[in-house]
Amino acid sequence: MEARAEARYMRVSPQKARLVVDLIRGKRAEEALNILRFTRKGIAGAVEKLLRSAIANASERFERLDVDTLYVVKTYVNDGPRQKRIRPAPMGRAYRYQRRTSHIAIYVGDRQADVVGVTPVRAASPAPAPGVPQGPAKKSRSGKAGAKPAARPATRAGGAKSAGKGAGKSAGKSKAAPKKTDSKKSK
């Protein structure tokens, strides 16, 4: 037994609506209403109204349904059409922005229905026997144990030299000057 309610073209971005809808997925309908009542988001009131509509749809559709046993089986928020708008910008330019809309759907049903988004608790996997290797050991690149990896050749940050304007100016300056050693102190 499942009933749904859908609100289309809601003037809220899907990202913001998903924050609220994710709070109630898999919860009992009564608990979900309480969560929505005390959620401090602008769309929470509209989602609460939508959930009440889904509960009413379920009670109308199925005569012998106990409303207290309903759960939020699945919920999702899809993108609606975007309204393109233009905002004035400095120096006679214009910035474009999009006013996003959402399509919100809530499905309620009894607990026997698959609850989407709630993962069952799995039993812990048994511990491996002592002394049994877990998997193949990692090999080093050179194949020798304890060997250092091969040094990479030094390259310039910019890659290959450019043949464009000013290419020859910095060619001699990139090398570091050799260190001067004092021959008198070495004795």
Image (spheres, rainbow, N blue to C red):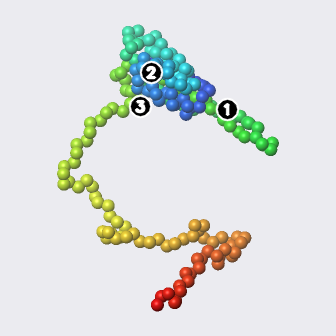
Q: Is residue 135 above or below residue 74?
A: below
* Position in image of residue 24 (x %, y %): 45, 25
For label 2, the residue is 32
Q: Which element type, helix, strand or loop, lies under badge 3?
A: loop
**Chain-order first, disc 1 or disc 2:** 2
The residue depicted at 40 percent of the width and 13 percent of the height is: 67
Viewer-nearest of discs 1 and 2: 2
The residue depicted at 57 percent of the width and 25 percent of the height is: 42
Q: Which element type, helix, strand or loop, lies under badge 1?
A: strand
* Position in image of residue 178 (x %, y %): 56, 81
* Position in image of residue 163 (x %, y %): 68, 72
**Chain-order first, disc 1 or disc 3:** 1
Q: What's the distance in space between the residues labelled 3 and 2, CA to CA?
A: 15 Å
Q: In which quadrant is the N terminus drawn?
A: top left
Residue 64 seen in render: yes
For label 1, the residue is 83
**Chain-order first, disc 3 or disc 2:** 2
What amino acid is found at the position of numbered circle 2 in the picture? Ala
Viewer-nearest of discs 3 and 2: 2
Which mark, residue 117? 3
Q: What's the distance in space between the residues labelled 1 and 2, CA to CA?
A: 31 Å
What amino acid is found at the position of numbered circle 1 in the picture? Gln
| Mark 2 surroundings: few (<14), some (14-19) or many (≥20) residues within 10 A | some
Q: Is residue 138 left or right of residue 31?
A: left
Quadrant of residue 137 within the rendered picture: bottom left
* Position in image of residue 103 (x %, y %): 56, 27
The residue depicted at 51 percent of the width and 31 percent of the height is: 19
Q: Are marks 3 and 2 in contact (CB under 8 Å)?
A: no
- Which of 115 and 133 lies nearest the eye of the viewer? 133
The residue depicted at 60 percent of the width and 28 percent of the height is: 12
- Which of 180 and 85 lies nearest the eye of the viewer? 180
